[in-house]
Image (spheres, rainbow, N blue to C red):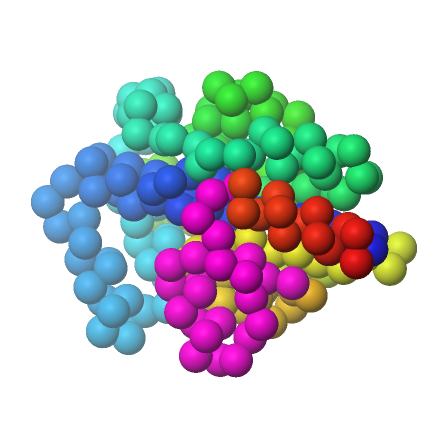
Amino acid sequence: MKLSLVLDFDGTVTTTDICVAIVREFIGPGWDDGLNRWRAGEIDQRQLMEWEFARLPGDRAEEMREYALREATVRAGLADLLELCRSYDVPVEVVSNGMSFYIEAVLDREGLSDLPFVAPIPTLNGLNGPAAEFGDGVETCERTGLCKCARARRLRSDGRKIVFVGDGISDFCVADEADFVIARSSLKEHCAKQGIAHTEFRDFNDVRRRVAELIEA
């Protein structure tokens, strides 16, 4: 079976949500005001992202990058999964609604600078303008920010099936778009409630086994 693999970043590639950690650390008191508004249904996911990004201090960008590197632990088994994908010509892309600067930093640290990724580019201190920019050719979503569904569809070429690996609320939509879902945390719970077929994972060794099964199918 010909496949393409799409990976979420925060809580999937990494064991914890680095975006949340940065927001908590660098916005300071009131960092969760936007989160509470989202929980109350007053704003959607994209508005929450913009609220948080706009309040991050532009003069502390390098400090935030270093903080992310200290906080980020990559989930076990990623290198072996990527090697399997290279061996069987499975394109891989990381798709995130986190922040590009720390994703790039973590991937570079892990020797994965050649791993394609897309993510919002925070403008920082964007209270009077756009809080984030998106690269050329990246489709956005009015509800979530970066459109993960569009990224999945982009990789659905030459009859390839999409395997999506994720864990959070920004992954709910793309779970319907993907042919195969590998999930944990709130995405796993969402799939169970919605009757979406999925495989649970703890680390990338689980993902590798599932991808190998699909390749051989």
Which residue is depicted at the point 59% across and 62% down? 181
- Count of numbered circles in the view: 0
Q: Is residue 121 left or right of residue 26?
A: right
- Residue 99 within the segment the image draws in magenta: no
Asked where in the image residue 53 lies, by quadrant, the reply is top left
Using the rendered image of the protein, determine whether residue 112 is visible from the camera's viewpoint. yes
Q: Is 202 situated above or below 63?
A: below
Which residue is depicted at the point 69% across and 66% down? 179
- x%, y% of residue 158? 89, 55
Q: Nearer the viewer, residue 213 or 33?
A: 213
Which residue is depicted at the point 38% across and 63% down? 186
Asked where in the image residue 208 lies, by quadrant, the reply is top right
Could you tell me which quadrant the C terminus lies in?
Answer: bottom right
- x%, y% of residue 152? 68, 57
Magenta stretch in the rendered image:
180-204
- x%, y% of residue 117? 60, 38
Q: Residue furthest left?
A: 29
- x%, y% of residue 97? 47, 50
- Residue 184 within the segment the image draws in magenta: yes
Could you tell me which quadrant the N terminus lies in?
Answer: bottom right
Q: Is residue 117 left or right of residue 162?
A: left
Q: Nearer the viewer, residue 176 or 28?
A: 176
Using the rendered image of the protein, determine whether residue 95 is visible from the camera's viewpoint. no
Q: Residue furthest right?
A: 158
Which residue is depicted at the point 44% across and 36% down? 75
Q: Is 190 situated above or below 158?
A: below
Q: Is residue 63 left or right of residue 13?
A: left
Q: Is residue 26 left or right of residue 112?
A: left
